[in-house]
Image (spheres, helix red, strand yellow):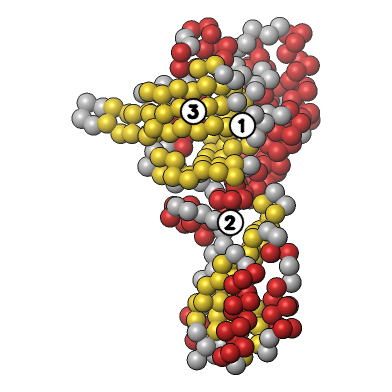
Amino acid sequence: MIEIRSLVKEYRSKTSTVIGVNNVSLRINRGEIYGIIGRSGAGKSSLLRCINLLEEPTSGSILVDGVDLTKLQGESLRQARLKIGMIFQHFHLIRSKTVFENIAFALKANNKSKAEIEPRVLELLEMVGLADKRDVYPAQLSGGQKQRVGIARALANEPHVLLCDEATSALDPETTQSILELLKKINRELNLTIVLITHEMEVVKDVCDRMAVMQNGNVVEEGPVYNIFSDPQHPMTRSFISSLFQFNLPERLIQHCKGTIVKIHFVAPQAEEAIITDVMTNFKVRANILHGKIEYIHDNPLGILILELNGEVSELRQALDYIEERTYRLEVIHHAE
């Protein structure tokens, strides 16, 4: 669906050249939600804006539906862009126009007739849950409602691709979740390919099928979301994922514990098995749960559990061997006194 080949984007001034995107190649499949994550300045916005040529690449190719956009000019490029919708972090609505008029604006720009515009706008308002807001102005809307208008406007000309530039960054957590659910619904019902950039790992976890991690203009890791969450390879990726699994035990608690403290990493299907119950049944050890969390990524569990284990040295050793054999990874944080 989207193929990015050896893409380079440079920003040049009289005195220096800054590389925004550094020789990036990616393939995004039709109908999937693809996440691009990175810290500020990583190059993710530059990459996204190159996909619809809002930023002109310095070199490389952008193919959408087999058509190389970098080879197009004039009317042919304008027509190709109509099939790529885009939503923005700060909505970019026209304040002097109603919700209806904001959405209609995209259709008028495509020379649609009045007879075509009205039913299409009403259909879109229904789709994004704003049927009762058609005559309201942006100033009267909440942030989430403004973003819904932005989504409706981006869908007006029935695009094949939807680009989301930090679409939830300006929203509170509850509203973010409702917008993500809307994007999933649109993806499912329209078979729309969605490319979503964010600096929030939670967003990628909740909606994306595959993902890329960017740093300093480079893609440092790429693949299915579950695989990257369960086995991150690059330090940047591990840093992002640790923000979801933040387990900093108080030093006071560690000093108070007399047993061995272990951190256990579970992946599917181990996270659904009664491994700890089996340990306490099969070995003469006691387990005290200090911390734990399980996340679900596309219904597949991924979790971390921190335990204090007490018992005789030989029993502890056998129990730890048993856990290590049946889980993804075992770390000993603190040895028994």
Q: Tags 3 and 1 in contact by the CB under 8 Å rule?
A: no
Image mark for residue 29: 1
Q: Residue at x 62, y 67 (%)?
A: 327
Please tell me whether mark 3 sits on a helix, a strand or a loop.
strand
Q: Quadrant of residue 160?
A: top right
Q: Position of residue 322 (x, y in %)?
A: 63, 76
Q: Residue at x 68, y 36 (%)?
A: 183
Q: Amino acid at mark 2?
A: Ser
Image mark for residue 4: 3
Crowd class of label 3 (few under 14; some 14 to 19; many from 20; radius 10 Å): many
> Of callouts 1 and 2, which one flags the residue occurring earlier in the amino acid sequence?
1
Image mark for residue 89: none
Left or right: where does residue 58 sit relative to residue 132?
left
Residue corresponding to mark 2: 230
Q: Position of residue 286 (x, y in %)?
A: 66, 87
Q: Amino acid at mark 3?
A: Ile
Q: Amino acid at mark 1?
A: Asn
